[in-house]
């Protein structure tokens, strides 16, 4: 009787072949790091992501390196290294890195000390604004929140600016921003405009419910 390889064996064989190709052709490339993550070799992946970030100025590598540092907290690595690389990722056009940078400044006292001379609260707004312009809905929503309440002595409260950020956040799919625009913001809007945001919010809710009901693929091992 002929031997028929199992799906797991075929998958393992394919991974070995892919690994050889990556090592032969681009050992220090971003794709190889992704492959290492698949093999659950996070430390090796982190080394390659850092190299492609530093040497090739590849923003996604900077972002993913920062993410691995947060997830695994490698021994001997400066705790704020993830902040530095997310900030670099933001400078290289990664929207998620911009938001991560802002959240680090807000939540991590060590990071705030590092950027103390740059006025941390204003830097938060700057990072959120950049993330918003790069298409991150959460960055738009959080930037709107900053302008809605203001920062004493640093950022003047501006409901009109908050409204503009929420408009963009809602357009990008942020349900909380759509909720603000459909009645929560203390700003008078024309009826049809407010109704349009309510419709957008409902569309997002329906899309989420459909997604949750859709059959999920089994997790790979």
Image (cartoon, rainbow, N blue to C red):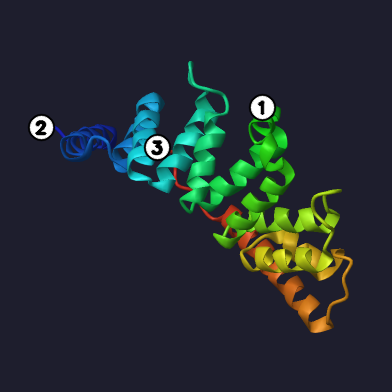
Q: Disc 1 marks which residue?
A: 110
Measured Cα–Cα span from mark 1 to mark 2:
65 Å
Image position of 61 with respect to 167: above or below: above
Q: Residues within 10 Å of mark 1 (few under 14, many from 20)?
A: few
Measured Cα–Cα span from mark 2 to mark 3:
29 Å
Q: Position of residue 71 (x, y in %)?
A: 53, 29
Could you tell which of marks 3 and 1 lies nearer the N-terminus?
A: 1
**Which residue occupies 35% across, 26% down?**
44
Q: Residues within 10 Å of mark 3 (few under 14, many from 20)?
A: few
Which mark is on residue 191? none
Q: Disc 3 marks which residue?
A: 220
Q: Position of residue 48 (x, y in %)?
A: 34, 33
Q: Nearer the viewer, residue 124 or 140?
A: 124
Query: Is disc 1 placed on a helix, strand or loop?
Result: helix
Residue 99 is left or right of residue 65, and the answer is right
Could you tell which of marks 1 and 2 lies nearer the N-terminus?
A: 2
Name the image quarter holding residue 24: top left
Tag 2 and tag 3, C-beta contact below 8 Å: no
**Which residue occupies 72% across, 53% down?**
142
Could you tell which of marks 2 and 3 lies nearer the N-terminus?
A: 2
Image position of 97 with respect to 204: above or below: above
Q: Nearer the viewer, residue 2 or 32?
A: 32
Image position of 32 with respect to 175: above or below: above
Measured Cα–Cα span from mark 3 to mark 1:
38 Å
Q: Disc 2 marks which residue?
A: 1
Q: Which residue is at the far top?
A: 75
């Amino acid at each position: 009787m002929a031997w028929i390889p199992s799906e797991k064996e075929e998958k393992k064989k394919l991974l070995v072949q892919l690994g050889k190709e990556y090592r032969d052709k681009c050992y220090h490339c971003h794709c190889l790091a992704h492959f290492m993550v698949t093999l659950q070799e996070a430390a090796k992946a982190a080394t390659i992501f850092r190299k492609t970030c530093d040497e090739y100025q590849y923003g996604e590598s900077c972002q993913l390196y920062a993410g691995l540092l947060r997830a695994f907290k490698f021994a001997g690595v400066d705790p704020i290294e993830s902040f530095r690389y997310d900030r670099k990722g933001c400078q290289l056009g990664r929207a998620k890195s911009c938001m991560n940078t802002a959240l680090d400044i807000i939540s991590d006292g060590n990071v705030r000390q590092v950027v103390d001379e740059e006025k941390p609260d204003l830097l938060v707004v700057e990072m959120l604004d950049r993330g918003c312009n790069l298409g991150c809905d959460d960055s738009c929503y959080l930037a709107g929140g900053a302008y809605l309440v203001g920062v004493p002595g640093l950022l003047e409260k501006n409901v009109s600016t908050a409204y503009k950020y929420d408009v963009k956040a809602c357009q990008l799919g942020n349900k909380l921003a759509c909720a603000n625009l459909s009645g929560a913001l203390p700003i008078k809007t024309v009826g049809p405009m407010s109704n349009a945001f309510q419709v957008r919010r409902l569309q997002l809710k329906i899309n989420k419910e459909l997604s949750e009901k859709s059959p999920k693929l089994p997790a790979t091992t």
